[in-house]
Image (cartoon, rainbow, N blue to C red):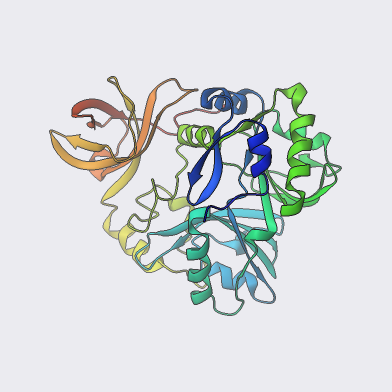
Amino acid sequence: MTRRTPLNEAHRKLGARMVDFAGWDMPVQYSSVIGEHEAVRTAVGLFDVSHMGEIEFTGPGALETVNRLISNDLARIQDGQAVYAGLLNDLGGFVDDVVAYRFSPERILICVNSSNREKDFAWMSARAEGVKPVDKSDDYAQIAVQGPKAVGLVQRLTKSDLSQVGTYRFTEGEVAGVKAIISRTGYTGEDGFELYCAAGDAVKLWDALLEAGQPDGVKPCGLGARDSLRTEMKYALYGNDIDDAHTALEAGLGWIVKLDKAGGFIGKDALAAQKAAGVPRKLVGFELTGAGIPRHGYPILKDGARVGEVTSGTQGPTVKKPIGMGYVPANLATEGSTFDVEIRGRAVPAVVVKTPFLKKS
């Protein structure tokens, strides 16, 4: 049974090309992936991300309960702030990567990947000591407004002072008359907001943003542009760049792991041991120096022997280079290291580069 977001009909009216994504009928593009990508880099784009899941913990002890489940530390931030974090297994691999919102010590909202919604809810339910989670995913729609003109667009539609909402902070207010959580987060490398509203209000909010954004050159954007935008920033995609078999340290996400936090978390012991022993493989960003485009699953070779594989890759529309990510042995993970990517039987040379691929001023 294919799932549809509350904006499904709106996408079809806009002429979107729809595809199956983790069981959801989602727009992959409207006009062109490159045009939508460039709109986000230079102006503003709208994304329907209502397929993401929302899981809530409410009541005394909510913060402590969630803090034992995630790798980051909600006790170090204030109400109105959010953290990027991992739900990790006992070996330090990813059950999922999430964003946790701290409304108060008694209310925490966790945004999970659409493909992992049921799995995450079952995993958290089985391990939550104290407050039990509630799956609120069907109650919410989520629209991402991203790009250099995103803040101005949303500000015109709200009385909330968005200058007071810094990165990874959020507020509750109204946007175009719709009650919303206004979160300064995103998955593109550009400034902007992710707006959480009631599912029944999604069309009203979407239409208002599209109309008000016309002077800015707003474009509705699909999953194709979302993928190329995040790849240029080396943002990990669950199921590609991170999974249950690769640890947070191997993925280069040690910054979301707080080994010293009170109470610990699932996967802590394995990560502490790996940190002490040395990380054997690392997720790197690389550029091809020969012709071709790296794609998920392509072998990475060193002196003809397979040493890893590409996890994500694209022709970067903004950086104008063939770029990719992949896990390689630690001795090949330093900037300037070289290896080959096998593309249709050809060994194409590649070099490890500093990331993000797109350098933001």
**Residue 280 visible at all:** yes
Q: Position of residue 102 (x, y in %)?
A: 67, 60
Q: Residue at x 49, y 61 (%)?
A: 71
Q: Position of residue 130 (x, y in %)?
A: 59, 80
Front position in the image: 250 or 50: 50
Q: Residue at x 58, y 25 (%)?
A: 31
Query: Is residue 337 rendered to the left or right of residue 51?
Result: left
Front position in the image: 68 or 36: 36
250 is higher (above) or lower (below) than 225: below
Query: Is residue 325 rendered to the left or right of residue 145?
Result: left
Front position in the image: 150 or 166: 150
Which quarter of the rendered picture does the C terminus lie within? top right
Image quadrant where residue 328 sits: top left
Query: Is residue 72 rendered to the left or right of residue 163?
Result: left
191 is higher (above) or lower (below) than 89: above
Q: Position of residue 193 (x, y in %)?
A: 68, 41
Q: Position of residue 302 (x, y in %)?
A: 17, 35
357 is higher (above) or lower (below) than 282: above
Residue farthest front in this picture? 1
